[in-house]
């Protein structure tokens, strides 16, 4: 009888384990509320107001404390990806707030390459997080449309946190929004974002070529030129001015 009870208890644990692991790596409630409060529909951030609020800066700090001590490896890939996207975007905003006022993060020495941040029990730079962890681990080109480096030419910062449940939907919606707006044909020349120049290998790995990847998300004349085999790609200048309201 005791053995039967023990077996039933063990079985219950096994049945419940997948549901538990499907949860987000950390609670995103605070991060979600802050995005909703300080980010507008165009993805622009009200850094000035956020900087004035000691309460909301502390709330961001509390979220990043969870990020610092989290163990993503105990969760499925989707939850891990959502976690690291949030970690990147929240760390960028926190760094901007610490230095506020900021005209351009590109002019802030070491912003991406040398400043270390505690993320998932390791000290990482933003470049390490993006290029040595997120890109090679997940091999998901759509991350380039949700990772936001606080520049005007970046994709729109969403007004809600990325979660295990919405990560696929958000990635796809972000690609569908960003690519057509950034990609235009003029004759056989197609001008698009510098992201497709800097991270060309990511898009080639997914679709065979940058042109083929762009064609998946464009229509009409632009799509026709991209699929013609004669398209000449050009990349627009990247505006590094801060993405403030």
Image (cartoon, rainbow, N blue to C red):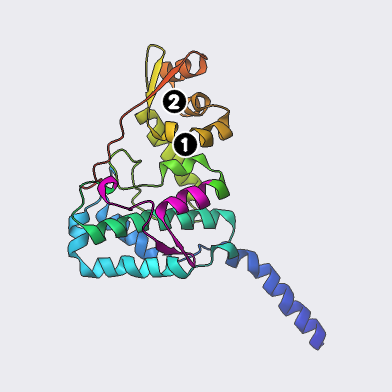
Q: In which quarter of the image is residue 116?
A: bottom left
Q: In this view, does 148 lie to the left or right of 202?
A: left
**Residue 188 among those drawn in magenta:** no
Q: Position of residue 136 (x, y in %)?
A: 55, 47
Q: Residue at image x 64%, y 69%?
A: 16
Q: In which quarter of the image is residue 198?
A: top left
Q: Is residue 236 left or right of residue 101?
A: right
Q: In this view, does 169 lie to the left or right of 104?
A: right
Mark 1 neighbour density, 10 Å: few (under 14) some (14–19) many (20 or more): some
Cβ atoms under marks 1 and 2 closer than 8 Å: no
Q: Nearer the viewer, mark 1 or mark 2?
A: 1
The one of 110 and 147 positioned closer to us in this rendering:
110
Q: Position of residue 138 (x, y in %)?
A: 56, 48
Q: Name the residue under label 1.
A: 199
Q: Residue at image x 17%, y 63%?
A: 52
Q: Name the residue under label 2.
A: 218
Secondary element at image label 2: loop
The one of 83 and 8 positioned closer to us in this rendering:
83
Secondary element at image label 1: loop
Q: Residue at image x 33%, y 51%?
A: 159
Q: Is residue 133 left or right of residue 105?
A: right
Span shown in magenta: 106-135
Mark 2 neighbour density, 10 Å: few (under 14) some (14–19) many (20 or more): some
The one of 49 and 238 positioned closer to us in this rendering:
238
On the question of residue 117 being in view, the answer is yes
- Spatial separation of the CA atoms under disc 1 and disc 2: 19 Å
The one of 165 and 211 positioned closer to us in this rendering:
211
Tell me: residue 110, above or below residue 152. Answer: below
Q: Position of residue 241 (x, y in %)?
A: 24, 42
First reached walking from the N terminus: tag 1 or tag 2: 1
Q: Position of residue 201 (x, y in %)?
A: 53, 34
């Amino acid at each position: 009888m005791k053995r039967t009870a023990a077996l039933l208890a063990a079985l219950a644990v096994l049945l419940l384990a997948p549901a538990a692991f499907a949860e987000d790596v950390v609670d995103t409630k605070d991060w979600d509320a802050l995005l909703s409060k300080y980010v507008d529909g165009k993805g622009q951030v009200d850094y000035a107001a956020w900087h004035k609020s000691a309460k909301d800066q502390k709330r961001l700090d509390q979220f990043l404390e969870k990020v610092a001590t989290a163990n993503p490896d105990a969760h499925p890939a989707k939850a891990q990806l959502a976690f690291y996207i949030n970690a990147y975007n929240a760390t960028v905003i926190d760094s901007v707030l610490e230095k506020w006022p900021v005209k351009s993060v590109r002019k802030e020495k070491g912003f991406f390459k040398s400043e270390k941040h505690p993320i998932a029990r390791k000290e990482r730079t933003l470049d390490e997080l993006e290029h040595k962890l997120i890109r090679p681990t997940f091999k998901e080109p759509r991350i380039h449309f949700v990772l936001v480096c606080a520049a005007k030419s970046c994709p729109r910062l969403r007004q809600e946190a990325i979660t295990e449940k919405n990560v696929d939907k958000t990635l796809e919606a972000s690609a569908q929004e960003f690519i057509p707006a950034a990609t235009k044909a003029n004759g056989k020349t197609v001008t698009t974002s510098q992201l497709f120049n800097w991270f060309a290998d990511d898009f080639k790995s997914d679709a065979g070529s940058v042109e083929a990847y762009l064609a998946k998300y464009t229509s009409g004349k632009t799509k026709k030129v991209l699929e013609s085999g004669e398209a000449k790609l050009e990349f627009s200048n990247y505006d590094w001015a801060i993405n403030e309201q």
